Image (cartoon, helix red, strand yellow):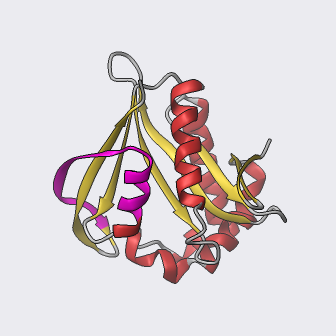
């Protein structure tokens, strides 16, 4: 089922049949995403590589550890991803949020709508209390998306993730869902 977000863009759960479409989306956005993501092996950009990625992500979903969604346009083309990952139950009831939007639909409010959808799902469908997100220090656009969604800055993590081939600092944010 596709939930409408903005214009003709909607969100739905990732499917095992999405390998070719996901690979095409990553190939189309390779340069656009390179400054914000880990260095990827060539196989990542192939249908076979995405098939393995999807199998892993769906296994985590089946185990209750993540919720992988894809953003799709009116023709069903994948134009982004948004994921709740590292879901913790018990007294923490928390998850990490990550997302990206296709360069062709960037700037249309899609990331903001997708984040709002993910937060509502985290609270209403998954019973979570808190969602955390991190951005590179210089990623002002993502910081604005998170601020609009009610996230608060909770810290600065030095050398937090290896992005674009080097360890980079991140700003950490959280949103309490109660």
Q: In the image as oriented, which residue stretches furthest toward the right?
A: 75
| 104 up-or-down from 15: above or below | below
Image quadrant holding the C terminus, namely top left
Residue at figure coordinates x 69%, y 73% from the top left: 24
**Residue 20, located in which quarter of the rendered image?**
bottom right
Residue at figure coordinates x 30%, y 47% from the top left: 173
Is 156 colored magenta in this rendering?
yes
Image quadrant holding the N terminus, namely top right
**Residue 53, located in which quarter of the rendered image?**
bottom right
Q: In the image as oriented, which residue stretches furthest toward the bottom?
A: 31
162 relative position to 19: left or right: left
Residue 56, image x, y percentages: 57, 46
36 relative position to 127: left or right: left
Residue 90, image x, y percentages: 37, 16
| 14 up-or-down from 103: above or below | above
**Residue 110, located in which quarter of the rendered image?**
bottom right
Residue at figure coordinates x 17%, y 54% from the top left: 156
Residue 164, image x, y percentages: 34, 75
Residue 161, image x, y percentages: 28, 60
Magenta segment boundaries in residue numbering: 142-162
Is 46 colored magenta in this rendering?
no
């Amino acid at each position: 089922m596709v939930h409408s977000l903005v214009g003709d863009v909607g969100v739905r759960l990732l499917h095992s049949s999405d390998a070719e479409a996901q690979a095409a989306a990553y190939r189309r956005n390779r340069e656009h995403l390179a400054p914000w993501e880990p260095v990827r092996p060539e196989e990542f950009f192939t249908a076979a590589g995405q098939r393995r990625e999807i199998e892993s992500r769906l296994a985590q979903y089946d185990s209750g550890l993540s919720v992988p969604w894809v953003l799709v346009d009116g023709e069903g083309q994948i134009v982004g991803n948004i994921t709740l990952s590292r879901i913790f139950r018990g007294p923490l009831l928390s998850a990490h949020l990550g997302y990206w939007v296709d360069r062709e639909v960037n700037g249309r409010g899609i990331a903001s709508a997708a984040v709002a959808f993910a937060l509502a799902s985290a609270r209403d469908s998954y019973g979570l209390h808190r969602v955390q997100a991190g951005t590179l220090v210089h990623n002002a656009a993502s910081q604005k998306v998170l601020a609009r969604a009610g996230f608060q800055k909770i810290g600065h993590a030095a050398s937090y993730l290896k992005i674009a081939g080097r360890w980079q600092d991140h700003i950490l944010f959280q949103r309490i869902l109660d």
